[in-house]
Image: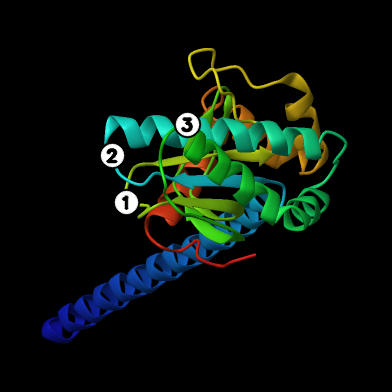
């Protein structure tokens, strides 16, 4: 009888441990699914609000890197003129698409004027971007629509920024994003998403959410293209 009671207690203990394990696993699975869903949805909403610029230099030589910045400056100046009245990403993309040949012409002109003969590739597509900070605005890693410019062999370091709203600042030392650009960005996304990218270091809750996006982006979860 005593052995039977001991066996029953042992069986009950194993059953409880098994139930705890199952409940813990289900809780972990639920949290993971919620986190993935949040990261994917938020990433998509943020990427749907911006048009980015990606410039690849011919090489990492000092000359080629300087040339990359000259091409970047010329294209940003032109884009800012074209999109001075644009109020949405869709409008900015339509304008950029209509002037693809002009972007290539300006890039080639800049390259030639500086004594080089590199060819240039210009296209609008959906590309993977790392986490980047522009002044007090930070964008998580993920896929974004962008104007991509390749110079020569395109084997040098990249330049990543945001063409719409214009968050690129040519004077990198200033680190100041124009207030009007922030306002356009704010109008094109939810209040929570804007708070996430503009205040990710000032609030523990927001910082955790941003780190969550970075984690899923870095581990290949945020690969759904727009």
Answer with left or right where residue 13 lies relative to residue 74.
left
Quadrant that contains the N terminus: bottom left
Q: Is residue 190 above or below residue 203?
A: below
Q: CA distance from mark 2 to mark 3?
A: 12 Å
Q: Which residue is mark 1?
A: 155
Q: Which residue is mark 3?
A: 69
Question: Residue at the spot x=56%, y=26% of the render?
Answer: 203
Quadrant that contains the C terminus: bottom right
Out of 43 and 167, give the one closest to the viewer: 167
Q: Which residue is mark 2?
A: 60
Q: Secondary structure at mark 3?
A: helix
Task: Write down the quadrant of residue 28 in the picture.
Answer: bottom left
Q: Disc 3 or 1, which lies upstream in sequence?
A: 3
User: Disc 1 vs disc 2: Cβ atoms closer than 8 Å?
Assistant: yes
Circle 3: is it few (<14), some (14-19), or many (20+) Cα within 10 Å?
A: some
- Horizontal and vertical percent for residue 87? 86, 41
Q: Secondary structure at mark 1?
A: loop
Count of numbered badges drawn on the protein: 3
């Amino acid at each position: 009888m005593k052995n039977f009671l001991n066996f029953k207690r042992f069986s009950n203990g194993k059953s409880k441990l098994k139930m705890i394990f199952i409940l813990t696993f289900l809780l972990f699975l639920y949290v993971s699914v919620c986190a993935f869903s949040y990261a994917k949805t938020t990433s998509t909403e943020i990427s749907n609000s911006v048009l980015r610029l990606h410039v690849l230099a011919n090489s990492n030589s000092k000359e080629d890197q300087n040339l990359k910045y000259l091409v970047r400056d010329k294209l940003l100046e032109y884009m800012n003129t074209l999109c001075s009245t644009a109020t949405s990403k869709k409008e900015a993309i339509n304008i950029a698409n209509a002037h693809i040949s002009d972007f290539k012409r300006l890039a080639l002109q800049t390259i030639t004027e500086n004594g080089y003969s590199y060819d240039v590739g210009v296209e609008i597509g959906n590309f993977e971007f790392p986490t980047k900070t522009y002044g007090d605005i930070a964008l998580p890693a993920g896929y974004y629509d962008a104007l991509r410019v390749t110079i020569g062999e395109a084997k040098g370091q990249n330049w990543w920024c945001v063409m719409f709203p214009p968050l690129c600042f040519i004077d990198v030392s200033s680190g100041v994003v124009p207030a009007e650009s922030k306002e356009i960005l704010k109008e094109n996304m939810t209040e929570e998403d804007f708070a996430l990218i503009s205040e990710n270091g000032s609030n523990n809750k927001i910082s955790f959410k941003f780190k969550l996006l970075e984690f899923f982006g870095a581990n290949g979860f945020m690969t759904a293209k727009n």
